[in-house]
Image (cartoon, rainbow, N blue to C red):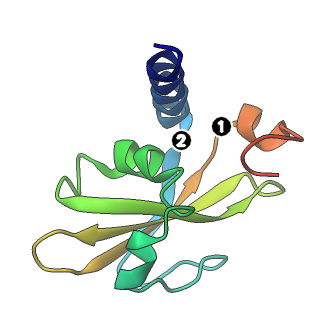
Amino acid sequence: MHKMMAGWICLAFLAAIACCISADVNGKKWPDGCTEVTSTSFVNTSLLRLGPVCDAVNKKEHPSDVWVAFNFNRKNCTVCCAGKNRTSQDIYYALSKAPPTLCKKKSGMFH
């Protein structure tokens, strides 16, 4: 029961973050501050942690993509997102602005 509650709390937290994030740069070429990812990046569970946030931000334009987040930059308050299309396997990049509360946090999952 406690694990289920923790899961719902985590999901609510990610949804709240998604409301505050906006995509600044996007396209098929990775933006400055981001690095290129490959298909194997999408099986790396540490990159999937903020994947739901990237998914929420980019869902309207890219509903068929699986998202990973990487290169969180607390100073600039940005996170790189990469989405891989489930059918074509194309990778789409987006540099998103994270909410200020996430960037000021000194401990937690980004420390």
Q: What is the number of the mark on residue 56?
A: none
Q: What is the number of the mark on residue 99?
A: 1
Residue 34 location in percent, x, y? 60, 77
Task: Tell me what residue is drawn at x 27 percent, y 47 percent.
Answer: 59
Circle 2 sits in a helix, a strand or a loop, which is it? loop
**Amino acid type of disc 1?**
Pro
Query: Which quadrant holds residue 92?
Result: bottom left
Quadrant location of the N terminus in the rendered image: top left
Camera-side residue of 105 and 39: 39
Query: Which quadrant holds residue 94?
Result: bottom left
* Location of residue 1 with respect to 40 vertically, above or below: above
Q: What is the number of the mark on residue 21?
A: 2
Q: Is residue 18 left or right of residue 59?
A: right
Q: Is residue 74 left or right of residue 84?
A: right
* Location of residue 77 with respect to 27 vertically, above or below: above
Residue 12 location in percent, x, y? 48, 22
Task: Tell me what residue is drawn at x 53 percent, y 28 percent.
Answer: 10
Residue 36 location in percent, x, y? 51, 86
Q: Residues within 10 Å of mark 1 (few under 14, many from 20)?
A: some
* Location of residue 19 with respect to 26 vertically, above or below: above
Circle 1 sits in a helix, a strand or a loop, which is it? loop
* Location of residue 111 with respect to 14 vertically, above or below: below
Task: Tell me what residue is drawn at x 58 percent, y 83 percent.
Answer: 35
Q: Are marks 2 and 1 in contact (CB under 8 Å)?
A: yes
Q: How many marks?
A: 2
**Amino acid type of disc 2?**
Ile
Camera-side residue of 108 and 19: 108
Residue 69 location in percent, x, y? 52, 61
